[in-house]
Amino acid sequence: MADKHDIPEGEVTSLKLWRCLPLAILLIAVGTVFATGLHRSLSFETFVHYQVQLRQMVAEHRLPMLGLYVLVYVSAVTLSLPASAFLTTIGGYLFGWLLGGTVASMAATLGATSIFLIARTSLGRPLLKRAGSRIQSLAEGFHRRAFSYLLFLRLMPVMPFWLTNLAAAFFGMRLKSYILATYVGMLPVSFAFAFAGSGLDEVIAKHERARQQCLAASGADCTIDFDAKSLLTLELIIALAVLGILALAPIVVRYRRTGGNHEDKEREAL
């Protein structure tokens, strides 16, 4: 096998450019979305304006609309737009909590996997190689227990969804473990938002009444402000917190067994 130093310099440069091409395309796509204002379409106000037409289209063309929903969801996650909670809620409203939650978790996993592969190929490995020993040691620890860590972050979004994707890529998490932890971790969250979205009619009516009152009072700004996360009840939040803590249980148990030795040489086939 030829040593990497035997590869002509021109070919090395070409390989680097090809490796960075997906990231360049992604950055161009993100810039285009924000420059054209397309990201504003993923808003509650836009949804309320077209919700009657959307429900009618779903009733008449269920499968094509489901496919369109998946495409929009995957694209939004790949572009790292902060719309996952909103889109999952809308999926529950349009398709019912069971189908909506199932499809949303799959779409979120597909989108997250796309950005993970792009980041790992273009940035993760090259940056990690140039990182200091402290960062590489941290990456090694994360890599050994990556499934539990990522599962916790999916269940308890203490970090933004897009940042979690990039962190997993940077620390060299294995693809199979990443996909499994993302899908399992997204299931409870997706069903929670989809279930809340299945009863969205009352929320829509409430915001429409507020908007009409604003217009009647000649308000200058009558936009509908809504956060999908406000639909989560305290009970659901506590349940997700418990699941998140349980996800870290294997790490805590292993830590106690080894007496806190961070030089543990155990390697898990995750």
Image (tube, rainbow, N blue to C red):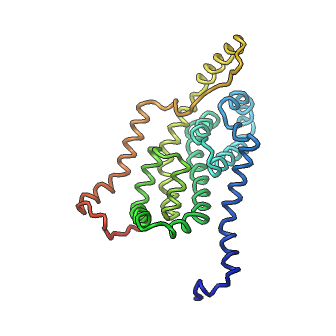
Q: Nearer the viewer, residue 74 or 123?
A: 123
Residue 40 x/y as whole percent: 70, 37
Quarter of the image with the N terminus is bottom right
Residue 241 x/y as whole percent: 39, 41
Q: Note whether 38 is above or below 259 in the view shown.
A: above
Q: Note whether 185 is above or below 237 in the view shown.
A: below
Q: Tell how many labels.
A: 0
Q: At x 51% / y 47%, what residue is drawn? A: 186
Q: At x 67% / y 37%, what residue is drawn? A: 42
Q: At x 57% / y 52%, what residue is drawn? A: 109
Q: Quadrant of residue 72?
A: top right
Q: Which of 75 and 38 is in front in this view?
A: 38
Question: Left or right: where does residue 18 sit relative to residue 3?
Answer: right
Q: At x 31% / y 67%, what residue is drawn? A: 264
Quarter of the image with the C terminus is bottom left
Residue 30 x/y as whole percent: 69, 50
Residue 83 x/y as whole percent: 61, 41
Q: Which residue lies furthest to the top in this view?
A: 217
